Amino acid sequence: MKKPSILIATADAELKRLLAFLLQKQGGTEQLSATSASEALRKAELALPALVLVDSALPGVDGLTLCRRLRAMATFLDTPIFFLGDRPEVKYQAFQAGATDVMLKPLDQLEFQYRLRVHLRARQRGLEPAEPVEAGTLKLEAASHTATLREKAVQLTPSEFAILSFLAAHPEQAVTTEILLVEALGEPRQLGNPQVIHTHIKNLRRKLEPMPAEPALILSSRRGYTFRPPAS
């Protein structure tokens, strides 16, 4: 079985050596590296890494912009992006840009390795097919990550499928973003990015709702998201 690859995007030679050492120490992955955002985007598109490590201090196009551009790629909607920042206020900017997790430099090496393992496990779990779910006229096919609504088949990403399956398994119940991050996507508690859920819900509505701006299938409230089974 091919090892998952991790893309390191940094122009800092010392940081690159440290990250390469920590990845080698952990084992089980292959390494790719890029010293600019443009190089990182090219390699990400070709190699489809299992996780991307993004340094905030990239030359030219910075790490935050790289995060946004990665998230704009259809193949990177579900890929963990681990952002390495240089000041506290950048943490929130990174989450808004689409980062899955953020740590500040200099890195706590043990914490970094722990978080890395958690994200890789969550990524693998998200790729495993879930049990089939039926709710009203909605049918979810786990093997193909396909949702069939009123006899119309729609292709979903693995994360979209996992979120919709969890909501459909708990109809008429308000489910928080934290629960969806942990239970549907397998993210570690209090480490996941709520914006990831909001983005996936937006995409699900665009794919499934006749009027995404006035959703009838996935409703929003202060308590979270509620799935309402479609009538026959």
Image: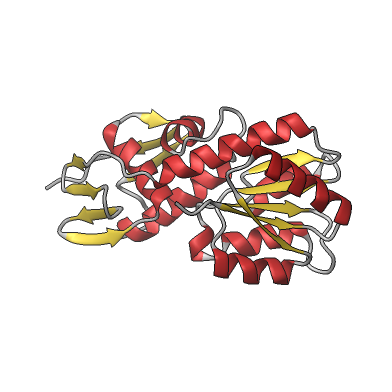
Q: Is residue 171 visible?
A: no
Percent position (x, y) of residue 96? 66, 49
Q: Name the foreground residue: 194 vs 56.
A: 56
Q: Name the foreground residue: 164 vs 136.
A: 164
Q: Which residue is drawn at 44% across and 51% down?
A: 1
Q: Where, by quadrant of the figure, is residue 228 drawn? A: top left
Q: Which residue is drawn at 60% across and 36% down?
A: 117
Disc tally is 0
Q: Where, by quadrant of the figure, is residue 42 drawn? A: bottom right
Q: Specify whether 230 is left or right of 155.
A: left
| Residue 54 higher or lower than 86, as above or below | below
Q: Is residue 24 visible?
A: yes
Q: Name the foreground residue: 119 vs 152.
A: 119
Q: Specify whether 146 is left or right of 44.
A: left
Query: Which coloring applies here?
Result: secondary structure
Percent position (x, y) of residue 6? 62, 53
Q: Where, by quadrant of the figure, is residue 144 drawn? A: bottom left
Percent position (x, y) of residue 212? 38, 57
